Image: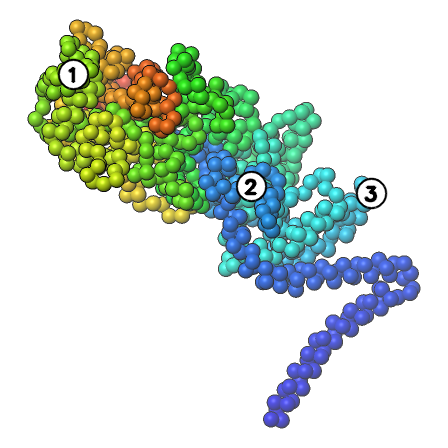
Amino acid sequence: MHVMLSLLRLVIAILEHLIAVPVKIVRGVLDVFVFNPRLGPLRYIAGFALAYVAFALILVYPVAFLRGFLGGPFLAEQLKYHEERWLATAIYDQAGNFVGVLDPKMDSQRDFNYTGQPIEFGNYIANPDHKSIPVREVPDQYWRCLVYHEDRHMGSLLNPFGIDLIGVLKIPASSLMRTARAGKPRLGVGGSTLPMQLARVIFNTPPRADESSFDKLRRKLSEWWIAPVIQRELTRGDQRRLKEWTANHLWLAQRAGGGPLHGMEVTSRVVFGKEARDLSIAEQFVLASAVNRPIILQEGSERLNEVRLSHWRYITEVRARRCAEALISNPDEQKAVLFELVKLAGGPPDPVVRPKLQMALEEFAPQLAKPAMANPVLRANVLIPDVRYGVREEMKGEFGLDWRSQVRGVNLTLDVAENRHFRVRVESELARLQSRFGVRLDSGFVVDPKLARGKDGDRKLPSIIVVAADRKGEIVRYYEADENASYFGSPFARDRGTGVYHREKEARAIASIGKIVAAIVVANAGQDAPETPWTDSAAPENGLETCRKGNGTVVRTRLARVAFACSLSKPIEWRLAQLGQERVRKTIDALGLTLPPAVSASEATPPSTAAVRGLLTASPQKVHQMAAVVLAALSGDGKTPVRLPTLVRGYDLTGPDRPDEEAQKGAIVPDEILKPEARALVRTLLQAPLCYRLREAPHGTLRSLANWCAERRADLKLHFAKTGTHVTEDPDAIVDVWIAGGIQFTNGAAYSYVVLVGTGSTRQPFARKLHSSELAAPLAELLLQDLAQHAVQSMQVAKSSAFSAVRDPADPRSAKDVRKDSESKGLWWQNGEERKRIFGDRS
């Protein structure tokens, strides 16, 4: 007991000394500097200085620690929500070139504040947001240079909790110097740590030239208040999240054709034309040195251009050079980096865009070309105005409304510049169709986009869809006239809670396109030929070999070929009913089409009737897939699964990559739909609308496209197509006009396609007496012309790639000489089967 009491006395004595010593020191300092009458008025200055030092010590240590510890639970989820909301989705073309960034206005969560002003929701204030492409991994030299410039004492005794002691202490001295220079009171600058700069991003409060001292003080206090919480939350365990935030969200460039550029990933693509992971050390130093000194991207007045170049040189020659000299110890490496910085400093930071994309910008949006080069959002809006909406629908279908948190980037399947050219050609054709058929359109509709007055106007566009995909299901041409992306399904068939499309809710009837199902069922039965007679209960008195129709009083037989060429419903429905409803139902289900709803089984529409009379429902994408399945079966790819046509070649995900089977959901194996022995009959029946002739005159529903019949063209190996016109109870009130088909060129290139103009609703017909052959066929012909050019170009690329694959790298001869010699010897292809696969069997 005595020993314990002795130890207790010792501890108490030590504590007394620990408390007494600082108190004595403070008292001595106060006596010497504050309460010393010999100092006169200087003692007031000394008093202020001591009080400010005490304030700084209390702020940096106990206050910052307690604020970070207590504020974390309240701010952690908010930081996570900010990070998710700020994720941008990059867009790349089929060659991997950076196209731009999806417009924040397209965010499916609809919680992104793109107004540039705070928005109040009761007690919650939504501050202006930004979008940033997240980096995969923060480049090491960028981080080192950033810390060197902006937060050199991070994690040390001078800055343990997110506020830098030296930075706080130098504010009075900085204020005196700024006041002396300005001739009026000005608040000085202090060392803003990285967490403090992130607080500026959260509240969108960057320093401004016109900022008053009071506003600056208020901003600084708010940064001090939130920085310890950010520091604690982003450095739990390690600095990985803090590195990512500073790499993704700090301002790095301004005058970008809109808002500033945030984050090194998007800035590196605009300034250097490359991904962040491919930046050289010098380029990493430049971007790190641009923090608080944003790069000025666009030219302006003569004075601005001088400032722009001076600003760029200060970043490269001064700030980035300091990093090179301080952080690189290897003399040779340091010399190389300094040399590169000198080269970078030689010219202003003009935005880097691939030449083909730059030409497209200058051609299609000359007034927006320069700002679009600097602004990736504007660039995507100009180059892929319709494609971006289709991509969003695909992402909603794959990932739901929260796609932004999972998709970092999207690789498109099409050439952006070529598709933009195609869009111009389609709209030119639509203007011609408007002038020709405008009198037959409903007064509330136009088909010329230039005449549409917007969704709130009294004249609007029906859905106008012109899409083609290659044999892999990758869309190579895509046109839509509105923002609904109806190609991927009607808006009301999409779940509002998840964004996922449900095909059973689709109400858009596919009209006589359903006769493709009839052709498959008839051919699979193996009982008919093109010349087989079928009973027509609505036959004409004479001209049975033509497309004439009777009034329902005459019953005759008509050939199967004629029935499909002229889209005659009665004989085809008669034949399907004979073959049995179960066969038709199975084919409908296998193709993913939907039968019309019924109150009870006894009142259900027979599948044969639904298929022939156009009562089946499906999205244009599903109809397109059906055409692709038939094309694959007829062109020898029957064993290869045919997926839904897509605009997305691949996703760059924030998490693990999806398994391959995810991309094959909904795929159909053609040989499971169409028997190999049935292909010849299907080919004949579905080519008939294009190829059927009577006395050397075309007579099919697509006689206007008779010049695209494969039997009469040397460059075509296969071409089938089917029309459809959906009407209301009034047979002259047009709801939708369709064409779906597939084409294969003799060089092996093959494409499926779909063309649609209409509203999809029987309550809203858009025209009168205007059928597929008049409105959809001209658009289909334009598409076919474009595909013919694409086929030639794609085969040239394939041929060049194949040559590169078979050439011996060790061969000293030039590529031109090797190619010439190989062709002369017939050795251009080492693999004959590969040649047949790509170019077709010419035998």
Q: Quadrant of the N terminus?
A: bottom right
- Callout in the foreground (3, 2): 2
Q: Position of residue 765 (x, y in %)?
A: 37, 23
Q: Residue at x 53, y 28 (%)?
A: 372
| Secondary element at tag 1 | loop
* Amino acid on which disc 1 is placed: Thr
* Quarter-of-image position of residue 599: top left
Residue furthest to the left: 527
Q: Position of residue 96 (x, y in %)?
A: 40, 33
* Amino acid on which disc 2 is placed: Asn
**38 relative position to 377: left or right:** right
Q: Residue at x 69, y 50 (%)?
A: 220
How packed is label 2: few (under 14 Cα within 10 Å), some, or many (20 or more)? some
- Callout in the foreground (2, 1): 1
Residue 50 has which mark? none
Residue 113 has which mark? 2
* Amino acid on which disc 3 is placed: Lys
Instruction: Name which of mark 3 and mark 2 comes first in the sequence.
Output: 2
Q: On the image, numbered disc 1 is attached to which residue?
A: 553
Q: On the image, numbered disc 3 is attached to which residue?
A: 184
Distance from the alpha carbon under mark 1 to that under mark 3: 101 Å
Q: Position of residue 304 (x, y in %)?
A: 67, 28
Tell me if I can see residue 763 in this picture: yes
Q: Nearer the viewer, residue 10 or 681?
A: 681
Q: Is residue 676 above or below residue 109?
A: above
**379 relative position to 2: left or right:** left
Q: Residue at x 27, y 22 (%)?
A: 724
